[in-house]
Image (cartoon, helix red, strand yellow):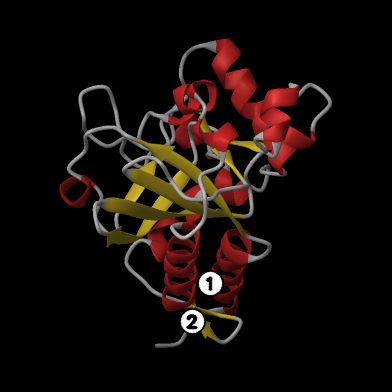
């Protein structure tokens, strides 16, 4: 099938937004979830609330680890207004209208790792049901292998005391993308209706360099 130059550019831009410069971020929870029933590889979900995560991780003391691949997290620990504790924890934040593709569910003994990749709003139509080669690599296989290797390696480490502290766990215990009723947030853009929250989201977008039209709603989507 022939692809127009315009569509080629669009696909290229989506892949670059998603994968170029991406890093892994970590967040653990002990919530009692039926992981394999809720999180299905290939599904697209939305954060739904501000997601705190860390660039650092060792052995998880919790039952579930989220590992998030992203090039557009707001690295708050680098800012002047970051507290000493959150700087030490290397706090990074994903705003509520962050969208993720579930890449993999990996279980080792009784612990799960849920691998999510941060994708742009307007990349959902092409990333939802497709696997792509990026820089001549099978992107899905390459990143899944890296994420699983990360989990295997970290399970052999000691725990990180600061990331297992009650203070940090309180910030990270809510499972990514799950509403209070236990259902997943659908992958649609929504303003909260609270100006403070919406302004904070925009501030985090600026810190993350997340102002590309690929990940901003159109006027129609804002209605």
Disc 2 target residue: 3
Percent position of residue 83, x then y = 74, 21
The circle drawn on residue 7 is 1
Please tell me which residue is depicted at 63% across the width and 48% down the height of the picture: 72
Q: Are marks 1 and 2 in contact (CB under 8 Å)?
A: yes
Residue extending furthest toward the front? 158
Q: Quadrant of residue 61?
A: top left
- Nearer to the camera, 165 or 1: 165
Please tell me which residue is depicted at 62% across the width and 47% down the height of the picture: 55
- Nearer to the camera, 144 or 222: 144
Res. 124 in view: yes
Q: Quadrant of residue 77?
A: top right
Q: Quadrant of residue 30?
A: top left
Percent position of residue 42, x then y = 30, 61
Q: Mark 2 Cα within 10 Å, few/some/many (few <14, many 20+)?
A: few
Quarter the C terminus occupies: top left
**Element carrying mark 1:** helix
**Element carrying mark 2:** loop
**Along the horizontal axis of the image, is 174 left or right of 74?**
left
- Nearer to the camera, 155 or 6: 155
167 relative to 73, above or below: above
**Along the horizontal axis of the image, is 141 left or right of 204?**
left
Please tell me which residue is depicted at 60% across the width and 71% down the height of the picture: 12
Percent position of residue 105, x then y = 30, 59
Q: Mark 1 Cα within 10 Å, few/some/many (few <14, many 20+)?
A: few
């Amino acid at each position: 099938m022939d692809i127009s130059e315009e569509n080629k550019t669009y696909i290229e831009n989506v892949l670059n937004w998603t994968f170029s410069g991406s890093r892994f971020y970590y967040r653990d929870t002990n919530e009692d979830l039926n992981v394999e029933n809720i999180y299905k590889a290939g599904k697209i979900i939305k954060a739904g609330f501000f997601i705190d995560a860390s660039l650092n991780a060792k052995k998880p003391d919790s039952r579930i680890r989220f590992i998030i691949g992203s090039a557009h997290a707001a690295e708050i620990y680098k800012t002047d207004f970051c507290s000493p504790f959150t700087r030490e924890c290397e706090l990074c934040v994903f705003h509520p209208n962050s969208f993720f593709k579930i890449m993999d569910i990996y279980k080792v003994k009784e612990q799960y790792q849920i691998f999510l990749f941060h994708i742009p709003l307007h990349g959902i139509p092409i990333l939802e049901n497709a696997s792509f080669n990026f820089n001549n690599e099978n992107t899905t296989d390459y990143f899944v292998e890296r994420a699983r290797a990360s989990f295997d390696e970290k399970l052999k480490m000691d725990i990180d005391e600061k990331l297992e502290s009650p203070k940090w766990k309180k910030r990270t215990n809510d499972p990514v993308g799950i509403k209070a009723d236990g259902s997943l947030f659908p992958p649609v853009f929504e303003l909260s209706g609270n100006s403070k929250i919406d302004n904070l989201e925009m501030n985090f977008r600026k810190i993350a360099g997340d102002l590309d039209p690929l990940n901003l709603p159109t006027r129609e989507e804002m209605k």
